[in-house]
Image (cartoon, coloured by chain):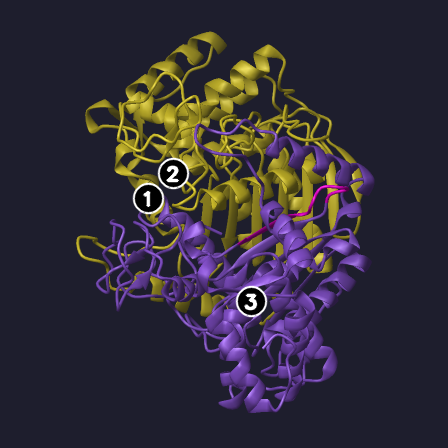
Chain colours: A yellow, B purple
Amino acid sequence: MLDRFKVPEADQVIVPEHEVRDATQAIFEAVGLEADDARVATDVLIANDLRGVETHGVSNQLRLYLASYKAGDLVARPKIAVERETMTTAVLDGGGGLGLHVAPYAMQLAIAKAREAGMGAVNVHNVGHMGGAGYHAMLALPHDMIGVAMSTSGRATVLPTWGAEPRLGTNPIAWAVPAATMPAFVFDIGTSQVAVNKMRLAARVGAKIAPGWIAKPDGTPIMDEVDMPAEYHLLPFGGTRELGSHKGYGLGAVVHILGATLSGIGPGFMNASPGFHLMAYRIDAFTDLAKFKSDMDALLRGLIETRPAPGEARVVYAGLLEAEEEAHRRAVGIPYHSEVIEWFRSAEREYGLHFAFT
Amino acid sequence: MLDRFKVPEADQVIVPEHEVRDATQAIFEAVGLEADDARVATDVLIANDLRGVETHGVSNQLRLYLASYKAGDLVARPKIAVERETMTTAVLDGGGGLGLHVAPYAMQLAIAKAREAGMGAVNVHNVGHMGGAGYHAMLALPHDMIGVAMSTSGRATVLPTWGAEPRLGTNPIAWAVPAATMPAFVFDIGTSQVAVNKMRLAARVGAKIAPGWIAKPDGTPIMDEVDMPAEYHLLPFGGTRELGSHKGYGLGAVVHILGATLSGIGPGFMNASPGFHLMAYRIDAFTDLAKFKSDMDALLRGLIETRPAPGEARVVYAGLLEAEEEAHRRAVGIPYHSEVIEWFRSAEREYGLHFAFT
């Protein structure tokens, strides 16, 4: 994550992982989730916070999920139904449950299909937010599979290239690939230039908005560094056509088609619920597993041994900084903005709980 | 394609599609390809030229392929061997043949597997250039499937984010999705900011290089509009980290891993031959086919009905302009640079052929 999004040190409170994990699980159980689902949902948020993906950790997300449970927009104990199924594919009705625990359920089904057939893909609709695609793709890793996860967003916030009306969500997509000894390759991006959650985080930490990240309400890309405007639209990644925004727009459309349209949610932009597309490939259906993992080590090591450009400290690959951050935060704790700690205090009072760190 | 890459009108010669198709097929047969393979290879190049993807048509590519046949780097009549196979997957040794006809062979195998099992994926190594990923993904369309095609490039030309040494190829990736009455969604991109072939085309038409497209030999991104420098490296799409080059770099690495590493070609960057990953999804393994195609119509129509931003004429989607260009060029012919016609004349003499348009 760019430095501009980091919580300023003066505002940081460091919390040991297990304390925020226990608190988050207790909150999920307090709103009615079964213990197993609460454990899985919590693991998604804490894994994101450990990996430094705090846009998708407890800070931004937990309060939104609780509001949705209260509003009746999320079902605490969903009935998941299989709508269509083949040996390699399935489409699930998520029963209105939170994607944080429904997506792992679907991904495990994709993994089971891939184990039998070489590949598996499971789609989900009528479901809440998955909490970042990377976590779910990574579920394939311990099975020596390649994982793919994508999700449409609940609402349209991103302009098509040359457009003035938002048509697609930020539509994240992730691939995760195991190696033998190197940290796994985990490529996890939004298809907008900047995530909705990053804009929220930027507001909290007072960060500037860089050129080419957003557009005026009339669709004109803003090409100066600015304070966050009151009204704006997100641009697809690339920003402008000359800088390749058709690539972000097109990849966002791929996620819409595979996640939502292929889930059968309906015509056009219908987008009330996200649509998930979760896939697993068994590596040994293609090549020798041990050789593949050793070849991955060589590839990833080669990438980080690339000579850096002038002024750059090092070259990394997708997933490396996150793995380093995870090792660090597991040891020393996770930094949260003091406002987030305040929020946990209010949740503690509201649900009659007791948290170690508040 | 951006206007800067178009052949200037004064340099254009318009050739009817069937004339350049016959000439190209005759050249492929003259270098030893079987008639069926020559027909398929020709169709890839002419389809690209019809769709306005002239970076991957006869202008840039044909002479390179002929040089490779002469140098013994390509085999005119390759023996394709299955190295590993499951009901959903296969890895092929392409026998050193040209990807233009080996990739369609592999894609048809992926489609056959998807027909039986719901999904199919076929990898190929020891093979030449596929001639653009979009064509091969589109082979799924008449089967009411979603097609995916990706290929690594024969050599490393693209810097990793923050790096000074090229590590990945331009590694194209494409998805093709059918609709009922609207032109198909065909998203086909390179993972560099600009394709090697576009740089070649820019040289031919004297186009300027835009900011953020390339880097100096030491890895520093060039952020001004410049004439093409003698030496440079390509940047991943996004250009710089602030503008999202980690997204282009990461997607390029995905293509390397799925196309090359998963084909078993070897450790690290080993890249003498491209590696292909070709995939097909049967739509009715997920949802009702007729509904899906009608929903796609609504989605694609909705995208082009988006109000344009100030100064923009219209909003399009991936594949629309190419379909419009194809209809136009089928009717009026394909514009080639006069230098390309000259090249056909020299090929005519060399192989003792006769072309209608030269």
**Residue topped by disc 1:** A325
- The verdict on a common chain for dots 3 and 2 is no
3D distance between C-alphas at marks 3 and 2: 48 Å
In the current view of this chain or complex, which residue is farthest to the left? Answer: A311
Label 1 marks a residue whose chain is: A
- Give x and y (percent) for residue A30: 55, 16
Viewer-side label of 1, 3 = 3
Magenta region: B179-188
Q: Nearer the viewer, residue B228 or B238?
A: B228
Residue, x 55% and y 71% (percent of image)?
Answer: B58
Q: What's the distance in space between the residues labelled 1 and 2, CA to CA?
A: 7 Å
Chain letter for the residue marked with disc 3 in the picture:
B
Q: Main secondary structure of the magenta part?
A: loop
Is the residue marked by circle 1 packed among few (<14), some (14-19), or many (20+) residues within 10 Å? Answer: some
Q: Is residue B294 above or below residue B175?
A: above
Is A94 rendered above or below residue B93? above
Kindly identify which numbered label has been placed on residue A50. Answer: 2
Amino acid type of the residue tagged 1 in the rendering: Glu
Which residue matches tag 3? B57
Please name the residue shown 46% across and 73% down the image: B339
Horizontal placement of A154 versus B294: left or right?
Answer: left
The image quadrant of residue A209 is top left
Left or right of B133? Residue A241 is: left
Q: 10 Å neighbourhood of mark 2: few (<14), some, or many (≥20)?
A: many
The answer to whether the residues at label 1 and label 3 have Cβ atoms under 8 Å apart is no
Percent x, y of residue B336: 53, 66
Other residues around mark 3 within 10 Å, as few (<14) / some (14–19) / many (≥20): many
- Quarter occupied by the N terminus of chain A: top left
Compared with A84, B232 (above or below) is: below
Q: Could you say which is closer to the camera, residue A302 or residue A160?
A: A160
Q: Nearer the viewer, mark 3 or mark 2?
A: 3
At x 46%, y 56%, the residue is: B6
